[in-house]
Image (tube, grey):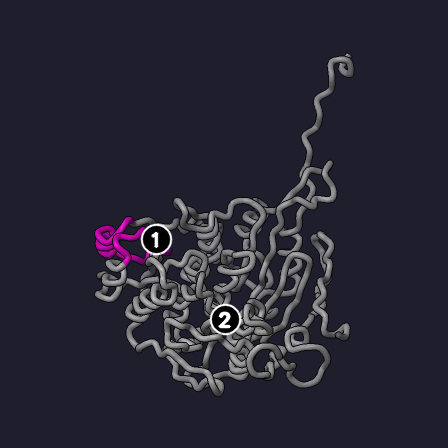
Amino acid sequence: MGATARVMRMRVAPHPRLPATLAVLSLAGALAGCGKGGPATLTGSGPTRKLAPVAVQGAVSVATRNTTRLGGAAVADDAAAVARTVYPGLTAASRPSVVVLVDEHDWPAALSASVLASAPTNAPILYSEGEALPPVSRETLEAMHPLGARALGGAQVIRIGTHAPLPAGERAYQLPAGTPAATAAALAQLVAKLDGAQAPRQAIVLAEDASATLAMPAAGLAAESGAPILLVGAARVGAATRAALAALHRPSIFVIDAAAVSRRVLHELRRLGALRAIPAGTPVAPAEAAAQNAIEVARYTSATFGWGVKEPGHGLVFANAGRPFDAPAAALLSATGDYGPLLLLDSATKLPSALIHYLADIQPAYAGTQFPPVRGAYNHGWLIGDEQAISAITQAEIDSMLEIVPRAQPAEEPSASEGE
């Protein structure tokens, strides 16, 4: 394999002033096979088939020692890059059973579909452009070659809010069209059907008109926990949501952005389960509300539910709050690999002060006398999107904040003889 096909990791010195340019490396060559030619061939049991190469914009990786950037300029690129990173499609074990296809303009459906990324299904999400399938989504579907979900009659793709044509030979399970709340409730039922196990005892609830930037962390939380995302109206809990909660038999109900839910609705929810509101926190500045809310979701824990990320040794997913569809696209990174909560930036070129403090709180450290820290805890960050989402300099800053560092040792008190 040529050097151009290798994925290399660039070391960045932990210094506050770093070069503005990081080396941009493409995963396309490594994922599609050696050399610069056509698609690679997969052999083994079953018929020989071609592996579709991944377009560069769908699998760009800028790697530093503690971070990996996935995606490009469009949300379809971001979803494809995440999907191919988790499922390169080169072996049966690296192929998903089923893939979710959702319209990139349907925010409620995309957010609610994030729960399908949870175990054991671990379905990646890809985006359509209305009734059209972008080339990068098509190529990714062909490369992953889903195995098919037995619970869905062998269907390989779950289509939500779109009838975009699939690659030849792939079959779809079509989720019936409905209101956002009805679609979310249908997805809750679908999760139980796919898992073939006991229904979850938790649910995540959001107001239908909740701010997308404040709702984004729900995607990763649903993927990690398997708790479905359900939607409530401004004045009442709708019939579909009520039925979904009833089917969960008085679950723990976790509300994100509770300020957007009326008192009347909260009162109704208390009758359907044990209600808990995940605190949003108080942002340092109004522009940092989304970042602060994401941090609170990352910190939150209640019994066995929640991330509870308050110490080093975790995966972390970083996205721009101005690109809400990146949250469902990245949900799979919250349910596989090093399982990371979603953290948000309100600007491509500046880290929110709340995020700086949070990363400082969970930065890995080791005793200065125990170098090298081979048994230390380590953080790793996944960055979603191109430099318009998160700049190269910001990536370098995040890398430094994730790096394991020596812990300052307390000064030894002088002995009595030394003080004489």
Q: Give the residue displayed 40% in from the left and 76% down from the top.
A: 158
Residue topped by disc 2: 96
Residue contact between numbered discs 2 and 1, judged by CB atoms under 8 Å: no
Residue 310 drawn at (x, y percent): 51, 45
Is residue 178 visible from the viewing direction of this image? yes
- Tell me if 203 is positioned left or right of 94 in this view: left
Point out the image quarter for the N terminus: bottom right
The question of residue 268 being in magenta is answered with: yes
User: Splitting the image into 4 quarters, where does residue 58 fall?
Assistant: bottom right
Magenta stretch: includes residue 224: no
Residue shown at 48% from the left, 64% from the top:
331
Q: Quadrant of the C terminus?
A: top right
Task: Judge whether 326 appears above or below 134 on screen.
Answer: above
Q: Residues within 10 Å of mark 1 (few under 14, many from 20)?
A: many
For the residue labelled by badge 1, is the local secondary structure a helix, a strand or a loop?
strand
- The answer to whether residue 258 shows anywhere in this view is no
Q: Which residues are magenta?
A: 248-274
Q: Which residue is mark 1?
A: 254
Residue closest to the eye, 326 or 163? 163
In this view, the residue in front, 357 or 87, is 87
